[in-house]
Image: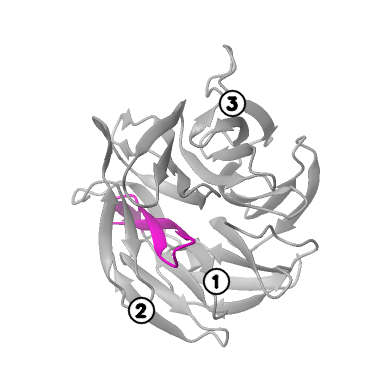
Amino acid sequence: MRRFEVLAEGLAFPEGPVVMPDGSIVVTEIARGCLTRVAEDGATTRMTETGGGPNGAALGPDGMLYVCNNGGFSWNTENGLKPHGRAEDNIGGSIQTVDPATGKVETLYTTCGDIELRAPNDIVCDAHGGFYFTDHGHRSGRKLDFGAVFYAKLDGSHINEVAFPLIGPNGIGLSPDGKTLHVAETSSGRLWSYAITAPGRVARPDWPSPTGGDLVAGLPGFQRYDSLAIEACGNIAVATLRLGGVNVVSPKGDLVERIEFPDPYTTNICFGGPDRRTAYVTLSGTGRLVRMEWARAGLALN
């Protein structure tokens, strides 16, 4: 197990780490319905309360934080904290904006046409004034929502569906040249890619692809993919559930390396530091944000 430093602990299922311009890290706390800022020395301050279940987040080119809100999970507290389906008081899925300076929260999207957003999960901004995000869907008793990928404009003027159906789409990222969209599917432990033909539009291969994408990589045994981050060289670093770690795979699907962490809910990774060689990882089951040196530089985000 590679050496890492615990930057913050006592967080309520942290996800969505975002490196801010001042070097601090903002994380979502899904179980508390809030965003928390973690200073470089580990000090934590509450930025704002979003309600529901703030999940993935991204810093837009306008300096605003864009937050995927899944509406709220129910929780299993045996042997740590872990999500357990849709909460009875779920407020509905949405994309929210948060002003880092004031903490003001506004709702940007709750629907795509007549499609209700069920459980927005993760998000990445492109270079064209928009962002792609996954809607994970919810499990409720014996019922399971299919998930999807959407594209939307930062100014709230447009949203469209990009890919459907997926079973628990989660992490999402863009290749260094912006021409390929990578999507991690939790339930299948599969990483899919889509060739982008225009902002918010992808090529859709014919059957038998169940998602409309091309399979990049899959995990053997009972492992599940969560969020992901892209390295500057194009490798995809995917946080992996159950066995607790980050799998780094090449765009061709070759396993570059696996980094183990002592938490089966290793959920998110992002890169920071002057050369983007510092990785920040959320160990959600144990409520920790950790950091470590990374072997390769992370990709500069839009």
Q: Which stretch did the figure color magenta?
A: 52-76
Q: Give the labeled residue for mark 1.
A: 289
Q: Is residue 284 above or below residue 70?
A: below
Q: Mark 1 Cα within 10 Å, few/some/many (few <14, many 20+)?
A: many
Q: Mark 3 Cα within 10 Å, few/some/many (few <14, many 20+)?
A: many
Q: Secondary structure at mark 3?
A: loop
Q: CA distance from mark 2 to mark 3?
A: 39 Å
Q: Give the labeled residue for mark 2.
A: 46
Three-letter code for the amino acid on which mark 2 is drawn: Arg
In the image, residue 228 lies in the stretch drawn in magenta: no
Q: Secondary structure at mark 2?
A: strand
The reply, left or right, for residue 266 in relation to residue 35 is: right
Q: Give the labeled residue for mark 3.
A: 213
Measured as percent of width and height from the top left, residue 104 is found at 27, 70
- The quarter in which the C terminus is drawn is bottom right
Q: Earlier in the sequence, mark 1 or mark 2?
A: 2
Query: Dividing the picture into quarters, in which one does residue 1 lie?
Result: bottom right
Measured as percent of width and height from the top left, residue 175 is found at 67, 44
